[in-house]
Amino acid sequence: MPYKKMNPKHLLAMLAFFGMLLATAVHLVGATFSPTGYRVRPTRNDVASTALEGRMFNEGDLVRERSQYGQRNFVSVGLSPTVAASTNLYLTISAGTAFINGYFAQVTTTTLISATAATTNYAFLELPTSSNLVTSVRYTVNTSGTNPSTHSFLLCSFTASATSITAAVDMRGLTPFSSVPPYTIFTSSGTYRVPDSVTVLKLTLVGGGGGGGGASGAGGTGSNSTAFTYTATGGNGGASSAGGGGGASGIDGSVAANGIRHGGQSGQSNTGGLGGGGTFLFPKYNNLATAPANTGVGGMGGSGGGGGGGETIQYYVTVTAGTGYAIVIGNGGTAGSGATVGRAGAAGLAIIEY
């Protein structure tokens, strides 16, 4: 077949058509662009811009991975203080394991740590570093309560006399991977130190119950309980004659910012009336030997009305890790006096979970 020269206009039209098809195919399939620096690990094919980095999984990689999942510092087992096994100015710390800023740290032996005499000491498990790499494991003790370094974790505070250890307070942050979250119950006033790396707590706080009225004297009002910036009001005392004290301020089930307030129940108004209920305990606490019963309940009247129950509040609280907060537990109201006396109200309590 003889060669026939193509019209230039037809050639341009054909090229434009194939160009349009190519552009459409790229649009449908999607364009790809490779970064100049990358690493996917661990990969057998060494997918990395620098040789062998795709196959390696080193210390920094593991720590960063754990930290990105929001894992906080905690003790998984042991590392608890024991005063009974201590002598002179030494405190015994048991063997155990902890996670500190993504590192798994294990101490396989019992250790004696020394205290500064005549003051309160704080014991930390620390992972000292050099050039951002952990070099050893050690206990650090100071009297300020300040974490000695980034990779450190408070275990306890302990009080020393001039010659011996007199008391120790367990301050370990425990594992969050439990059906029952770590908690502390206060039945008397004290200080709560927030565990390291914890920034949000759940607070249940109950005011003291009012005292029951006696034959010739009204019951006393229960004291308020306070924790962080919150107050649970104490219950009113019962009257010396028939007519019980009302509950604390607040309405059952009322919703407040970040929490709920429950007013205590009023005591019975008849002579010798029962005290009002102060609070309930969550089901998971009911089987614990340390869970106090009848918290914040008003006292029963003698010849008067029963006292009112203390108020219960529940809040989620934003806190600063490592900081100590005062917890004040309200006393129960005093019993009404007379030939037939009332009963004192029950004290309040605080339950702190994280």
Image (tube, rainbow, N blue to C red):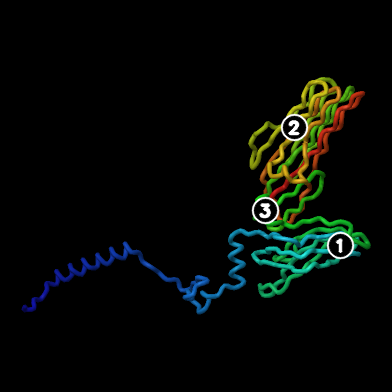
State which tag comes first along the sequence, 3 or 2: 3
Badge 3 crowding class, 10 Å Cα cut-off, few under 14, some 14 to 19, many 20 or more, is: some
Q: Position of residue 215 (x, y in %)?
A: 88, 22
- Secondary structure at badge 2 equals loop
Residue at mark 3: 199
**Residue 130 visible at all:** yes
Q: CA distance from mark 3 to mark 2?
A: 32 Å
Query: Do labels 1 and 3 touch, CB within 8 Å?
Result: no
Q: CA distance from mark 2 to mark 1?
A: 43 Å
Is 80 drawn above or below residue 209 in the view shown? below
User: Which residue lies at the image location 83% right of the left edge and 30% below the top edge?
Assistant: 211
Residue at mark 1: 85
Query: Would you identify the image quadrant in which residue 251 lies?
Result: top right
Badge 2 crowding class, 10 Å Cα cut-off, few under 14, some 14 to 19, many 20 or more, is: many
Badge 1 crowding class, 10 Å Cα cut-off, few under 14, some 14 to 19, many 20 or more, is: few
Q: What amino acid is found at the position of numbered circle 3 in the picture?
A: Thr
Query: Do labels 2 and 1 touch, CB within 8 Å?
Result: no
Q: What amino acid is found at the position of numbered circle 1 in the picture?
A: Ala
Q: CA distance from mark 1 to mark 3?
A: 34 Å
- In the picture, the quarter occupied by the N terminus is bottom left
State which tag comes first along the sequence, 1 or 3: 1
Q: Position of residue 354 (x, y in %)?
A: 68, 51
Q: Position of residue 195 (x, y in %)?
A: 72, 56
Residue at mark 2: 277
